[in-house]
Amino acid sequence: MAVLPTDAAPRAAAALPELQELLRLIDQGGSMLQARELASVATSAGALPVIGVTLGNPDPSVPALGFIGGVHGLERIGAQVVLAYLGSLVRRLRWDLSLHQQLESLRLVFLPVVNPGGVQAGTRANPRGVDLMRNAPQDADRGVPFLIGGHRLTRQLPFFRGPGGAPMEAESEALCRFVREELLGRPVAVSIDFHSGFGLRDRIWFPYARTRRPMRHLAEIHALCEVLDQCLSPHPYVMEPQSRHYLTHGDLWDHLYDEALSLDRGIFLPMTLEMGSWLWVKKNPRQLLSRHGMFNPLIEHRQQRVLRRHMAWMDFMTRATQSAFRWLPGPDTRIDHGEQALIRWYRRTVR
Ligand SMILES: [Zn+2]
């Protein structure tokens, strides 16, 4: 039961293949999906909608998993991976009893194109020149790298946080509201935000981006990492805190994680997948000549391979989220997981 305003579809369809695909899937999903316009973003070519989709049991007592993409407009492959997974679910809904059973005790939420104006223009930032993943109000600890960690100098430079004291951008606000409404406060919720960056490995990052101090749910992350290794090996992923690479100001997931902590209700585990785009460049060095090629596989068969590559993990994550209380550490194992995590990710020697 879609609740999109009547003019959203033609506006979006005229603009972007990713939004066209999303609207097609919403249509195909029929009464199994709910869709809503979370924001409308002004671009030079007219307004574009930010659309959220939900399926499964809306009861706030069941676990929930969110798939987010297209925060950085240049990294279109992130939006495409999220859409590919949503598409596979929509097609399976026609026949797959096990999926219907799964959705009786799981909520799935999708926000595939957070920054439609950036995707349309092929820019990392939104149409107002703001890097949404630097746009939350919090500052990082000392040691933030110049520019890349976020700055307030000018919107002409990448990684601009937005003016000091200004409200968050419409797209950031839409994402936060959607996460707040659909994920926070549940007994357990997980989110995965799909990006593509430099490097050869696919990295799963967890908070924090603003500090090298560990997050409160490090033991839970370690337990998840353990079941991932046990059940999906060999897999291509490296799990680690983002702060292991660099600190940033204004990370939206830090902001939402801290908000979840302040609610003091349930467990929220936000993760970011950074797909290693050097893999694609290495296999096709001509990509270096294209700005899009730095962040997206340009050859059709390689793009298909990337879309397929993450399906097994996304499916694993739906099962892991639904059954979280079977692997989340209890009072007897939590300290042990926490200590192993400190040794693994924070180079601490425990006792
Ligand atoms: Zn990104």
Image (cartoon, rainbow, N blue to C red):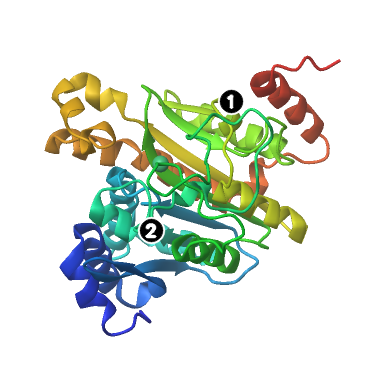
Name the residue nearer the viewer: 241 or 155.
Answer: 155
Q: Is residue 106 visible?
A: no
**Gap in Å between the C-alphas at discs 1 and 2?**
30 Å
Local secondary structure at mark 2: loop
Name the residue at 35% across, 38% down: 310
Local secondary structure at mark 1: helix
Assess mark 2: CB under 8 A from ligand 1?
no
Quadrant that contains the N terminus? bottom left
Crowding near pointer 2: few (<14 within 10 Å), some, many (20+)? some
Crowding near pointer 1: few (<14 within 10 Å), some, many (20+)? some
Q: Amino acid at mark 1?
A: Arg
Of tags 1 and 2, which is closer to the observer? 2
Name the residue at 53% across, 52% down: 135
- List the residue tagged with mark 2: 128
Q: Amino acid at mark 2?
A: Arg
Counting residues from the start of the chain, the first of labels 1 and 2 encountered is 2
- List the residue tagged with mark 1: 244
Name the residue nearer the viewer: 228 or 46.
Answer: 46
Quadrant that contains the C terminus? top right
Name the residue at 16% across, 36% down: 298
Quarter of the picture for ligand 1?
top left
Left or right side of 335 for 25: left
User: Tag count in the figure?
Assistant: 2
